Image (spheres, grey):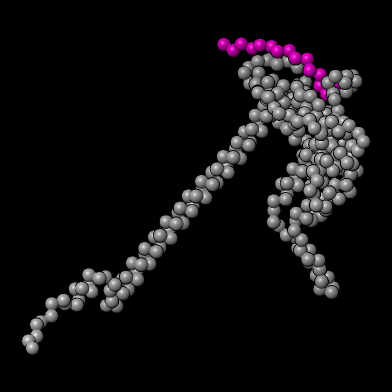
Amino acid sequence: MNVFISVVLFLGSARAASKTGDDEWVHLPNKCEVCKFVSIEMKSAFDETGKTKEVIDTNYRFLDDKGAPPIKYVKSDIRFIEVTENVCSRIMQYNLHKERDGSNRFAKGMSETFSTLHNLVNKGVKVVMDIPYELWNETSAEVADLKKQCDVMVEQYEDVIEDWYKGSQEEDLTTYLCEKHVLKGQDTGCLKETWAGKKGDMAAIAEDKKKKKGKKKKGKDGEDGQKKEKKVKKKKKKSKISDSESSKRRMEAAGFTSDEEEIQKKVPLNQPKTEL
Protein backbone atom coordinates (compact mmCIF):
# COMPACT_ATOMS: atom_id res chain seq x y z
CA MET A 1 0.00 0.00 0.00
CA ASN A 2 1.49 3.29 -1.09
CA VAL A 3 1.51 6.02 1.47
CA PHE A 4 1.38 9.49 -0.01
CA ILE A 5 2.69 12.28 2.16
CA SER A 6 1.60 15.77 1.20
CA VAL A 7 4.44 18.23 1.40
CA VAL A 8 3.18 21.78 1.08
CA LEU A 9 5.87 24.20 0.02
CA PHE A 10 5.02 27.81 -0.58
CA LEU A 11 7.71 28.95 -2.99
CA GLY A 12 6.71 32.00 -4.98
CA SER A 13 7.41 31.76 -8.65
CA ALA A 14 9.66 34.32 -10.30
CA ARG A 15 6.77 35.69 -12.33
CA ALA A 16 4.48 36.08 -9.33
CA ALA A 17 7.28 37.68 -7.33
CA SER A 18 8.04 40.20 -10.03
CA LYS A 19 4.36 41.18 -10.26
CA THR A 20 4.03 41.72 -6.51
CA GLY A 21 7.41 43.44 -6.30
CA ASP A 22 8.64 40.87 -3.78
CA ASP A 23 12.44 41.23 -3.86
CA GLU A 24 12.89 38.40 -1.34
CA TRP A 25 12.56 35.77 -4.07
CA VAL A 26 13.92 37.45 -7.19
CA HIS A 27 17.51 38.70 -7.04
CA LEU A 28 18.47 39.79 -10.52
CA PRO A 29 22.20 39.58 -11.34
CA ASN A 30 24.27 42.71 -10.88
CA LYS A 31 26.94 44.03 -13.27
CA CYS A 32 29.76 42.20 -11.49
CA GLU A 33 27.97 38.85 -11.69
CA VAL A 34 27.15 39.30 -15.37
CA CYS A 35 30.76 40.13 -16.27
CA LYS A 36 32.02 37.20 -14.19
CA PHE A 37 29.97 34.61 -16.08
CA VAL A 38 30.50 36.27 -19.47
CA SER A 39 34.27 35.99 -19.00
CA ILE A 40 34.06 32.43 -17.61
CA GLU A 41 32.02 31.17 -20.57
CA MET A 42 34.10 33.12 -23.07
CA LYS A 43 37.34 31.61 -21.72
CA SER A 44 35.76 28.17 -21.87
CA ALA A 45 34.63 28.73 -25.48
CA PHE A 46 38.08 29.97 -26.53
CA ASP A 47 39.69 26.92 -24.87
CA GLU A 48 37.37 24.54 -26.72
CA THR A 49 37.94 26.17 -30.12
CA GLY A 50 41.68 26.60 -29.60
CA LYS A 51 42.54 22.89 -29.88
CA THR A 52 42.11 22.62 -33.65
CA LYS A 53 44.93 22.87 -36.19
CA GLU A 54 42.55 23.91 -38.97
CA VAL A 55 43.84 26.40 -41.53
CA ILE A 56 41.57 28.80 -43.41
CA ASP A 57 42.42 29.37 -47.05
CA THR A 58 41.87 33.05 -47.83
CA ASN A 59 43.42 32.91 -51.30
CA TYR A 60 40.46 33.89 -53.47
CA ARG A 61 42.61 34.65 -56.57
CA PHE A 62 41.79 38.21 -57.51
CA LEU A 63 42.39 39.70 -60.98
CA ASP A 64 46.11 40.08 -60.30
CA ASP A 65 46.20 36.39 -59.29
CA LYS A 66 47.24 37.39 -55.78
CA GLY A 67 45.39 36.68 -52.58
CA ALA A 68 45.92 36.69 -48.84
CA PRO A 69 47.94 33.79 -47.44
CA PRO A 70 46.11 31.09 -45.44
CA ILE A 71 45.73 31.72 -41.69
CA LYS A 72 45.29 29.48 -38.67
CA TYR A 73 41.71 29.21 -37.40
CA VAL A 74 42.84 29.86 -33.79
CA LYS A 75 44.05 33.34 -34.83
CA SER A 76 41.23 34.13 -37.23
CA ASP A 77 38.41 36.66 -37.02
CA ILE A 78 35.98 33.81 -37.74
CA ARG A 79 36.82 32.14 -34.41
CA PHE A 80 36.37 35.46 -32.56
CA ILE A 81 32.98 36.11 -34.20
CA GLU A 82 31.74 32.57 -33.51
CA VAL A 83 32.68 32.77 -29.81
CA THR A 84 31.23 36.23 -29.18
CA GLU A 85 27.99 35.43 -31.02
CA ASN A 86 27.35 32.18 -29.13
CA VAL A 87 28.76 32.93 -25.67
CA CYS A 88 25.49 34.23 -24.23
CA SER A 89 23.54 31.15 -25.35
CA ARG A 90 25.84 29.17 -23.03
CA ILE A 91 24.43 31.19 -20.11
CA MET A 92 21.11 29.39 -20.63
CA GLN A 93 22.77 26.20 -19.34
CA TYR A 94 22.83 27.76 -15.86
CA ASN A 95 20.24 27.25 -13.15
CA LEU A 96 19.36 29.20 -10.05
CA HIS A 97 20.61 27.64 -6.80
CA LYS A 98 18.70 29.56 -4.13
CA GLU A 99 20.44 27.65 -1.34
CA ARG A 100 23.70 29.41 -2.23
CA ASP A 101 24.79 32.99 -1.63
CA GLY A 102 26.10 35.70 -3.93
CA SER A 103 27.21 34.88 -7.45
CA ASN A 104 27.42 31.19 -6.48
CA ARG A 105 23.63 31.00 -6.85
CA PHE A 106 24.24 30.79 -10.61
CA ALA A 107 25.62 27.39 -11.58
CA LYS A 108 25.15 24.58 -14.07
CA GLY A 109 23.29 21.48 -12.98
CA MET A 110 20.10 21.05 -10.97
CA SER A 111 19.87 22.95 -7.70
CA GLU A 112 19.89 21.09 -4.39
CA THR A 113 16.35 22.29 -3.65
CA PHE A 114 14.80 21.00 -6.88
CA SER A 115 16.88 17.84 -6.77
CA THR A 116 15.35 17.07 -3.36
CA LEU A 117 11.85 17.83 -4.66
CA HIS A 118 12.31 15.57 -7.70
CA ASN A 119 13.52 12.75 -5.44
CA LEU A 120 10.41 13.13 -3.26
CA VAL A 121 8.14 12.95 -6.32
CA ASN A 122 9.97 9.85 -7.58
CA LYS A 123 9.39 8.18 -4.20
CA GLY A 124 5.66 8.80 -4.42
CA VAL A 125 5.53 11.85 -2.14
CA LYS A 126 2.92 14.41 -3.15
CA VAL A 127 4.58 17.82 -3.38
CA VAL A 128 2.30 20.88 -3.53
CA MET A 129 3.86 24.14 -4.70
CA ASP A 130 2.82 27.47 -6.17
CA ILE A 131 4.85 26.50 -9.27
CA PRO A 132 3.31 23.68 -11.38
CA TYR A 133 5.48 20.57 -11.77
CA GLU A 134 5.76 21.18 -15.55
CA LEU A 135 7.52 24.50 -14.88
CA TRP A 136 10.08 23.22 -12.36
CA ASN A 137 12.81 22.96 -14.98
CA GLU A 138 11.94 26.17 -16.81
CA THR A 139 14.47 29.00 -17.01
CA SER A 140 14.22 31.26 -13.98
CA ALA A 141 13.75 35.03 -14.21
CA GLU A 142 17.27 35.55 -12.83
CA VAL A 143 18.96 33.36 -15.46
CA ALA A 144 16.88 34.93 -18.24
CA ASP A 145 18.01 38.37 -17.08
CA LEU A 146 21.62 37.15 -16.87
CA LYS A 147 21.43 36.15 -20.54
CA LYS A 148 19.80 39.45 -21.50
CA GLN A 149 22.51 41.50 -19.76
CA CYS A 150 25.17 39.25 -21.33
CA ASP A 151 23.97 40.19 -24.84
CA VAL A 152 24.18 43.89 -24.01
CA MET A 153 27.62 43.63 -22.37
CA VAL A 154 29.24 41.63 -25.18
CA GLU A 155 27.99 44.13 -27.75
CA GLN A 156 29.08 47.11 -25.65
CA TYR A 157 32.59 45.80 -24.91
CA GLU A 158 33.24 43.95 -28.19
CA ASP A 159 36.24 46.17 -29.02
CA VAL A 160 37.80 45.50 -25.60
CA ILE A 161 37.38 41.74 -26.00
CA GLU A 162 38.80 41.95 -29.55
CA ASP A 163 41.89 43.83 -28.28
CA TRP A 164 42.50 41.03 -25.76
CA TYR A 165 41.93 38.37 -28.43
CA LYS A 166 44.32 39.94 -30.95
CA GLY A 167 46.91 40.66 -28.27
CA SER A 168 49.15 38.20 -26.43
CA GLN A 169 46.23 36.88 -24.30
CA GLU A 170 48.68 36.44 -21.42
CA GLU A 171 46.43 38.37 -19.03
CA ASP A 172 43.39 36.56 -17.65
CA LEU A 173 40.23 37.63 -19.51
CA THR A 174 38.27 38.16 -16.27
CA THR A 175 40.95 40.57 -15.01
CA TYR A 176 41.28 42.34 -18.35
CA LEU A 177 37.58 42.65 -19.18
CA CYS A 178 35.93 42.95 -15.77
CA GLU A 179 38.45 44.55 -13.42
CA LYS A 180 40.12 46.90 -15.92
CA HIS A 181 37.17 47.89 -18.07
CA VAL A 182 33.58 46.87 -17.17
CA LEU A 183 33.96 47.29 -13.39
CA LYS A 184 36.75 49.85 -13.29
CA GLY A 185 36.41 51.78 -10.01
CA GLN A 186 33.39 49.66 -8.99
CA ASP A 187 32.80 46.70 -6.67
CA THR A 188 34.58 43.56 -7.93
CA GLY A 189 33.90 41.37 -4.88
CA CYS A 190 31.87 38.76 -6.76
CA LEU A 191 34.87 37.89 -8.96
CA LYS A 192 36.59 36.30 -5.97
CA GLU A 193 33.59 34.25 -4.86
CA THR A 194 34.08 30.52 -5.40
CA TRP A 195 31.93 27.50 -4.62
CA ALA A 196 33.79 24.63 -2.96
CA GLY A 197 30.69 22.44 -2.94
CA LYS A 198 29.27 20.48 -0.04
CA LYS A 199 28.16 16.96 0.72
CA GLY A 200 24.92 16.10 -1.07
CA ASP A 201 25.13 18.98 -3.54
CA MET A 202 23.82 17.42 -6.77
CA ALA A 203 25.53 19.96 -9.03
CA ALA A 204 28.89 19.30 -7.36
CA ILE A 205 28.31 15.53 -7.56
CA ALA A 206 27.51 15.79 -11.28
CA GLU A 207 30.71 17.79 -11.85
CA ASP A 208 32.79 15.21 -9.95
CA LYS A 209 31.27 12.39 -12.02
CA LYS A 210 32.16 14.25 -15.21
CA LYS A 211 35.80 14.64 -14.06
CA LYS A 212 36.06 10.97 -13.06
CA LYS A 213 34.59 9.90 -16.38
CA GLY A 214 37.22 11.97 -18.18
CA LYS A 215 40.03 10.35 -16.16
CA LYS A 216 38.69 6.84 -16.86
CA LYS A 217 38.51 7.60 -20.57
CA LYS A 218 42.11 8.82 -20.51
CA GLY A 219 43.24 5.66 -18.71
CA LYS A 220 41.33 3.46 -21.15
CA ASP A 221 42.88 5.25 -24.12
CA GLY A 222 46.33 4.66 -22.60
CA GLU A 223 45.63 0.95 -22.13
CA ASP A 224 44.32 0.65 -25.70
CA GLY A 225 47.48 2.32 -26.95
CA GLN A 226 49.68 -0.15 -25.04
CA LYS A 227 47.70 -3.11 -26.41
CA LYS A 228 48.03 -1.81 -29.97
CA GLU A 229 51.78 -1.35 -29.47
CA LYS A 230 52.15 -4.96 -28.26
CA LYS A 231 50.17 -6.26 -31.26
CA VAL A 232 52.42 -4.31 -33.64
CA LYS A 233 55.54 -5.76 -31.99
CA LYS A 234 54.15 -9.31 -32.27
CA LYS A 235 53.34 -8.79 -35.95
CA LYS A 236 56.85 -7.49 -36.63
CA LYS A 237 58.36 -10.50 -34.83
CA LYS A 238 56.23 -12.94 -36.86
CA SER A 239 57.14 -11.22 -40.12
CA LYS A 240 60.85 -11.49 -39.28
CA ILE A 241 60.50 -15.25 -38.60
CA SER A 242 58.53 -15.83 -41.81
CA ASP A 243 61.13 -13.85 -43.83
CA SER A 244 64.01 -15.93 -42.44
CA GLU A 245 62.14 -19.18 -43.14
CA SER A 246 61.34 -18.20 -46.72
CA SER A 247 64.98 -17.21 -47.42
CA LYS A 248 66.14 -20.54 -45.98
CA ARG A 249 63.77 -22.42 -48.30
CA ARG A 250 64.99 -20.48 -51.35
CA MET A 251 68.61 -21.37 -50.52
CA GLU A 252 67.76 -25.06 -50.11
CA ALA A 253 65.92 -25.11 -53.44
CA ALA A 254 69.00 -23.62 -55.12
CA GLY A 255 71.24 -26.29 -53.57
CA PHE A 256 72.74 -24.07 -50.90
CA THR A 257 72.50 -24.43 -47.18
CA SER A 258 73.61 -22.46 -44.19
CA ASP A 259 73.22 -25.34 -41.77
CA GLU A 260 76.56 -26.49 -40.34
CA GLU A 261 75.37 -30.08 -39.96
CA GLU A 262 74.39 -30.27 -43.64
CA ILE A 263 77.81 -28.97 -44.66
CA GLN A 264 79.49 -31.65 -42.52
CA LYS A 265 77.35 -34.36 -44.17
CA LYS A 266 78.17 -33.27 -47.71
CA VAL A 267 81.96 -33.03 -47.16
CA PRO A 268 83.38 -36.44 -46.08
CA LEU A 269 85.83 -36.22 -43.24
CA ASN A 270 87.50 -39.68 -43.71
CA GLN A 271 89.65 -39.52 -46.84
CA PRO A 272 91.25 -42.79 -48.20
CA LYS A 273 94.82 -43.25 -47.06
CA THR A 274 97.55 -42.83 -49.63
CA GLU A 275 100.89 -44.70 -49.39
CA LEU A 276 104.08 -42.81 -49.91
- 275 lies left or right of 105: left
- Magenta run includes residue 159: no
**To which quarter of the image does residue 109 belong?**
top right
Quadrant (top left, top right, bottom left, bottom right) of the C terminus: bottom left
Provide residue 274's location: percent of width, then percent of height: 9, 85
Position of residue 62 relative to residue 85, above or below, is below
Provide residue 251's location: percent of width, then percent of height: 31, 74
Name the residue located 48 percent from the left edge and 53 percent from the top edge: 229
Name the residue located 33 percent from the left edge and 67 percent from the top edge: 245
Query: In the rendered image, is residue 135 in sight?
Result: no
Position of residue 94 relative to residue 120, above or below, is below
Quadrant (top left, top right, bottom left, bottom right) of the N terminus: top right
Q: Which residues are magenta?
A: 1-17
Q: Residue furthest right?
A: 185
- 20 lies left or right of 115: right
- Magenta run includes residue 8: yes
Position of residue 86 relative to residue 199, above or below, is below
Name the residue located 50 percent from the left edge and 50 percent from the top edge: 226
**To which quarter of the image does residue 15 belong?**
top right
Query: In the rendered image, is residue 122 in sight?
Result: yes
- Between 27 and 134, the one lying in front of the other is 27
Provide residue 208's location: percent of width, then percent of height: 64, 32
Name the residue located 68 percent from the left edge and 20 percent from the top edge: 116
